[in-house]
């Protein structure tokens, strides 16, 4: 039993993300919203948030919670991973 726990801990320790890798969550909300001919106001009303909140999310100034991501995905019939993605950047130094 102890060996299994040690293996899990070793795996976690060896899975640390190097400090020179930076992540940013990006989105394609505006692109898909416009393809569906929806205004920010219309989409925001459908999922129960304000137009201002949707605008901030679209600009990437705020990361939506998981429920908002889900509701956006359902409202536009587009998988979450097409709406939101992670941009990875390697910094030298």
Image: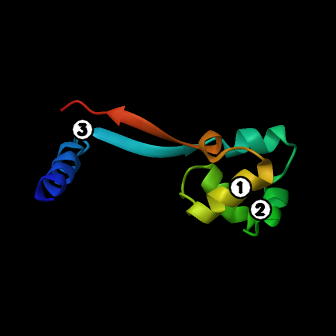
Q: Which residue is mark 1?
A: 72
Quarter of the figure that contains the N terminus = bottom left
Asked where in the image residue 45 lies, by quadrant, the reply is: bottom right
Residue 8 appears left or right of 72 = left
Residue positioned 77% across, 62% down in the render: 44
Residue positioned 78% across, 47% down in the render: 77
Against 48, residue 57 (above or below) is above
Which secondary structure lies at badge 1? helix
Residue 53 appears left or right of 66 = right
Q: Which residue is mark 3?
A: 20
Point out residue 54 in the picture as x, y percentages from the top left corner. Answer: 69, 59
> Mark 1 or mark 3: which is in front?
1
Gap between marks 1 and 3, in whole Å? 32 Å
Which secondary structure lies at badge 2? helix
Which secondary structure lies at badge 3? loop
Q: Which residue is mark 2?
A: 44
> Alpha-carbon neighbours of circle 1 within 10 Å: few (<14), some, or many (≥20)?
many
Q: Nearer the viewer, residue 19 or 17?
A: 17
């Amino acid at each position: 039993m102890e060996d299994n726990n040690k293996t899990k801990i070793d795996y976690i320790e060896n899975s640390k993300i190097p400090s020179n890798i930076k992540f940013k969550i990006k989105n394609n909300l505006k692109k898909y919203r416009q393809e569906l001919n929806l205004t920010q106001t219309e989409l925001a009303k459908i999922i129960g948030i304000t137009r201002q909140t949707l605008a901030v999310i679209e600009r990437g100034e705020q990361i939506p919670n998981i429920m908002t991501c889900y509701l956006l995905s359902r409202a536009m019939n587009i998988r979450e991973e097409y709406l939101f993605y992670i941009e990875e950047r390697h910094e030298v130094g």
